[in-house]
């Protein structure tokens, strides 16, 4: 035992190149950014030598410090890419940036133009990014830093492992699916234009029903596939959740894993959150803190403060306004609830124009009861977690979901549909789970407005029972959703891969 310990101590730290297309607080469209910030940091805290690789988007270049040129990569038919190293106080490791101004120096978000349409050259942008990632994976710049593991994420990093396939001494290849519904497909003409190896256009490789899929490349060419909750790992092997990939994933079930994301309690903690006006822990006067945070939330959203809104239960939602998140179910379930109960509804989100328009209509039909902010706002997202009483997350599918965990941690019991990571983290309130102390929220099954409405009503009733509510809040707040557990699981995966 003692001998083993000492040999462990001598072992060089594991080197991980973490390849992502977004990372909080540099650039964020959703949970992938939160994960690409917290997981590399959690790994770095556990004696792992990490480099986080991102595209050098304009917004990223504006925010980083100590920029330095590491070199120029020869991408063959894709031209050249400059590799930069930079730092940011939010990260415990150097950031590596793939600098191609023609592809990444733009307005808009990483994937869409300022009007929300996909950048037409996304296949080229992320093929270049993945090619560069693969070259850094074999230390093509001769930096003396060769990773043991290359960990790519979602379709944006999907080709990284394909490009590594030809290397004899390649690092272990781990690919994480954060959302299978987004996969980036294109036709044969585009495939040819990208000058990708012709044999990749085959069923065994990344051809997908007559098109080419960057997500499929990530699945086929990796040594390990991972996704972000145990339940989603099972769900995606079924036609209902597999988005056409179920058969492929069944084929690769031996290399498919599910590790639940964590939450970064340095950013999301009601005791220290810099966006809150009233901080609190589990033993504090939660209703008092919540009233103050709600007041600040409504003011920041531009509404006049009304006492009754502070006193009565408030249902909240933060998220992308898309089909996945079940926003249409909320739009149907909320009006009857407003009639039957005294609850109000607050939402912070941005997304599909049709849903945004319907939310504005809901707001006009219920002045003083419905509060809507259409846009992306990190401060409002935090304030809502601490200012609402009940958090609604009626997702049709949810690979992991972070907001239900933020809600549990903020003493804001979530109402969720039983799917993916939501079912893995939220325990429905029933006589039995109250009795055994595991109840922390409300769970419903069918993706229907009636089922959501019924679950929300149960939550509103429970909220009226202050002793019960306090127990639910305490249970959620006491749970450990930190990254420690997940980071350990990732390290085990890295060591097992290949
Ligand atoms: P997804 O990645 O599918 O969007 P997650 O629950 O994993 O869902 O993560 C969403 C993240 O994005 C959370 O940190 C959430 O607070 C944040 N978020 C989403 N939309 C908004 C918004 N409009 N304003 C502020 N934060 C948002
Ligand atoms: C995706 C999923 C979400 C998950 C996030 C981070 O965007 O939709 O459920 O929490 O990735 O893994």
Image: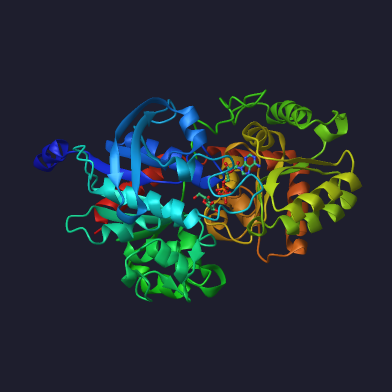
Horizontal side of residue 364 vs 98, given as left or right: right
Is 148 above or below relative to 56? below
Q: Quadrant of the N terminus?
A: top left
Near-viewer residue (430 or 122): 122
Where is residue 417 shown, x and y percent of the image? 64, 58
Quadrant of the rendering where the C terminus is positioned: bottom left
Q: Residue at x 75, y 28 (%)?
A: 300
User: Which is more toward the observer, 293 or 52?
Assistant: 52
Give residue 323's position: percent from left, percent from top: 67, 59
Residue 174 visible to the viewer: yes
One can see residue 259 in this view: no
Residue 419, image x, y percentages: 58, 61
Instruction: State the residue at coordinates (45%, 59%).
Output: 230
Q: Position of residue 354 (x, y in %)?
A: 76, 55
- Residue 276 lies left or right of residue 35; in this view the side is right
Which of these two is toward me, 102 or 48?
102
Residue at figure coordinates x 80%, y 30% from the top left: 302
């Amino acid at each position: 035992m003692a001998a083993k310990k000492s040999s462990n101590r001598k072992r060089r730290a594991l080197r991980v190149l973490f390849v992502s297309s977004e990372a909080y607080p540099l650039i964020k469209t959703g949970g992938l950014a939160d994960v690409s910030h917290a997981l590399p940091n959690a790994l770095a805290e556990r004696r792992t030598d990490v480099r986080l690789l991102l595209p050098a988007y304009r917004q990223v270049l504006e925010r980083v410090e100590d920029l330095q040129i590491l070199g120029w990569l020869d991408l063959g038919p894709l031209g050249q890419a400059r590799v930069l190293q930079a730092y940011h106080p939010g990260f415990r490791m150097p950031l590596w940036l793939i600098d191609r101004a023609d592809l990444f120096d733009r307005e808009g978000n990483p994937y869409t133009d300022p009007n929300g349409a996909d950048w037409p050259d996304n296949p080229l942008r992320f093929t270049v990014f993945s090619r560069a990632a693969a070259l850094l994976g074999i230390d093509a710049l001769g930096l003396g830093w060769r990773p043991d593991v290359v960990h790519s994420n979602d379709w944006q990093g999907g080709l990284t492992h394909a490009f590594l396939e030809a290397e004899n001494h390649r690092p272990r290849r781990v690919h994480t699916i954060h959302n299978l519904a987004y996969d980036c497909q294109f036709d044969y003409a585009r495939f040819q234009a990208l000058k990708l190896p012709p044999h990749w256009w085959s069923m065994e490789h990344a051809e997908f029903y007559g098109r080419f899929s960057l997500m499929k490349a990530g699945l086929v060419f990796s040594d390990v596939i991972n996704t972000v909750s145990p339940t989603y790992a099972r769900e995606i092997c079924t036609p209902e959740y597999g988005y056409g990939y179920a058969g492929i994933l069944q084929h690769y079930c031996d290399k498919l894993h599910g590790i639940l994301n964590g939450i970064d309690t340095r950013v999301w903690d009601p005791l220290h959150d810099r966006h809150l006006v009233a901080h609190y822990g589990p033993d504090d006067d939660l209703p008092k803190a919540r009233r103050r945070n709600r007041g600040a939330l409504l003011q920041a959203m531009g509404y006049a403060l009304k006492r009754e809104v502070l006193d009565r239960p408030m249902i909240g939602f933060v998220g992308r306004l898309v089909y996945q998140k079940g926003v249409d179910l909320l739009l149907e379930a909320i009006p009857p609830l407003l009639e039957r109960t005294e609850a109000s509804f607050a939402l912070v989100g941005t997304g599909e124009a049709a849903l945004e328009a319907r939310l504005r209509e809901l707001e006009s039909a219920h002045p003083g009861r419905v509060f809507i902010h259409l846009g992306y706002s990190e401060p409002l997202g935090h304030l809502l977690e601490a200012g609402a009483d009940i958090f609604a997350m009626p997702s049709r599918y949810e690979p992991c979901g972070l907001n239900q965990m933020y809600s549990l941690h903020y003493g804001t019991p979530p109402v969720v549909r039983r799917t993916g990571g939501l079912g893995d983290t939220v325990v429905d309130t029933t006589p039995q789970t109250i009795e055994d102390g595991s109840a922390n929220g409300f769970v419903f099954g069918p993706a229907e407005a009636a089922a959501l409405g019924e679950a929300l009503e149960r939550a509103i009733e429970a909220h009226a029972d202050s002793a019960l509510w306090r127990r639910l809040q305490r249970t959620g707040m006491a749970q450990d959703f930190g990254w420690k557990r997940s980071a350990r699981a990732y390290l085990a995966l890295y060591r097992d891969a290949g």
